[in-house]
Image: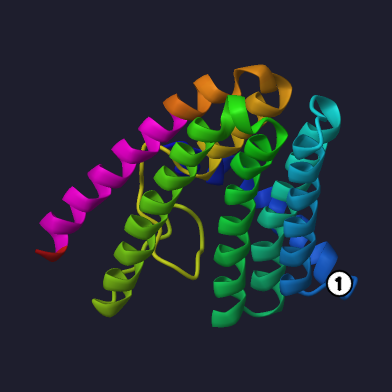
Amino acid sequence: MLDGMMRGVIDAPMNRGGRWLAALGASANGVTLVGLGLGLMAAAVLAFGGSGLPALALILAGRLADGLDGAVARATGKSDFGGYLDITCDFAFYGSIPLAFVLRDPSMNGVAGAFLLASFYLNGASFLGYAILAAKRGMETAARGDKSLYFTAGLMEGTETILWFLTMALWPVWFATMAWVFGGLCLITAVARILLARRVFG
């Protein structure tokens, strides 16, 4: 829901940062992997009982890298594999944070964390399935930035996910409650996208 608005705020500074990194010899795929590494480090901090500023800083740094990889790609030349690697690493990060809270306290967070991961699974399937059909029909959009895949709008997008993760990192005791609410919103997003697909592709 917020990704389109955020593109207007972050695109210009991200593109400048991407050109600077490209001039230093950084590769887009390398930046993608650095972003994933930072995100997994955040998950490890949360899984082992940490929270607060360390986890928050790692999440933000990882997402900054995730934004910069596309900017580097635009500066050096995009590739299909780069887009594929980017979305795969995004999903790996998104799954790692709920899993971290489950490992942190299985008795308290296990069921809520499993529900959140299941909602991510369905939401991701609806997103990627739509992108495949959109590509088959030659559909294009730049509403969510210059992407390798067709990005559909939704109630819960990347910006909202990061805000939820940051809130969970700051107040981990509330993870279960937040996971139930977050998962429910993800399911609403998936159902809305399925209905959209039926209207567009049906």
Image quadrant containing the C terminus = bottom left
Locate residue 164 relative to residue 200 in the image: left or right. right
> Residue 113, image x and y in percent?
53, 36
Residue under the image location 72 percent in, 34 percent down: 104
- Could you tell me what secondary structure mostly forms the magenta stretch? helix
Hey, what amino acid is under mark 1?
Ala
Q: Is residue 79 visible?
A: no
Q: How many marks?
A: 1
The x, y position of residue 159, in whole percent, is 55, 39
Within-10-Å neighbours for mark 1: few <14, some 14–19, many 20+? few
The stretch of residues the image draws in magenta is 182-200
Decide if residue 117 is in sight here. Answer: yes
Q: Secondary structure at mark 1?
A: helix
Q: Name the residue rendered at 44%, 38% in the picture.
A: 115
Q: Position of residue 34 (x, y in %)?
A: 80, 61
The magenta stretch spans residue 194:
yes
Report whether 75 appears left or right of 1.
right
Q: Tell me if residue 58 comes above or below residue 152 in the rendering.
A: above
Which residue is drawn at the image coordinates 87% and 76% (left, top)?
Answer: 25
In magenta stretch: residue 68: no
Q: Residue 156 sits in which quadrant?
A: top left
How is the structure coloured here?
Answer: rainbow
Query: Which residue is disc 1 drawn over?
Result: 23
- Quarter of the rendering occupied by the N terminus: top left
